[in-house]
Amino acid sequence: MSDEAVKIRRALIKKKRRLVQFQSTSPNPGLTEEQRLLVEQLAEAQKMTFDSNFAHFNNFRVYRPGVTDRENIDRIQEHLALTLMSHIEAERQSQEYRFLFAKIMECLTEMRTVSDEHSKQVLHIWDIQPGYTPLLLEVFSKVNDE
């Protein structure tokens, strides 16, 4: 490793240590024990890597074709949203964060719209493009297999 890579790696390690120390000292007074555990699990999951098509999350889109248990997914999503709101209220009590939950929910909705529009555009290109690149073949063969 180069000297610069070593410096970057050390900085990341220090940052993770500070984050762990902060998390262990943060009492989260506004969260229930269940919500605190959920936030910890989500924070830990953020550190992991997922496959490129995020297959773990596809099951949580209520309006995805083939979903049969919409009520259960709605209940889980509502629980996650309330946990996020409680976490924000407990950790970000300043007035500047009063609309943070609404902004996050707006971003999630916008990301879903962008994702749907992007998929439509790529599928349109897929239909009109006579010669497929290996990358497109790989990406859409995985989509068609699902």
Image (cartoon, helix red, strand yellow):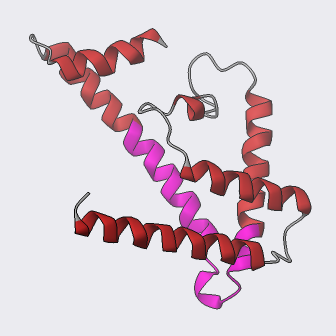
Find residue 92 and report its horizontal and vertical position in percent.
Answer: 67, 81
Viewer can see residue 90: no
Find residue 128 and report its horizontal and vertical position in percent.
Answer: 14, 15
The image quadrant of residue 89 is bottom right
Find residue 87 and report its horizontal and vertical position in percent.
Answer: 74, 69
Q: Is residue 36 above or below residue 129?
A: below
Q: Is residue 144 above or below residue 40?
A: above
* Of residues 55 and 46, the one drawn nearer to the viewer in this rendering: 46
In the image, what residue occupies the spot 73% across and 34% down? 73
In the image, what residue occupies the spot 40% across and 39% down? 115
Q: Is the magenta region chiefly helix, strand or loop? A: helix
In the image, what residue occupies the spot 79% across and 50% down? 79
* Residue 15 part of the magenta-drawn span: no
Q: Considering the image in quadrants, where does the N terminus appear?
A: bottom left
* Residue 102 part of the magenta-drawn span: yes
What range of the chain is rendered magenta?
A: 87-115
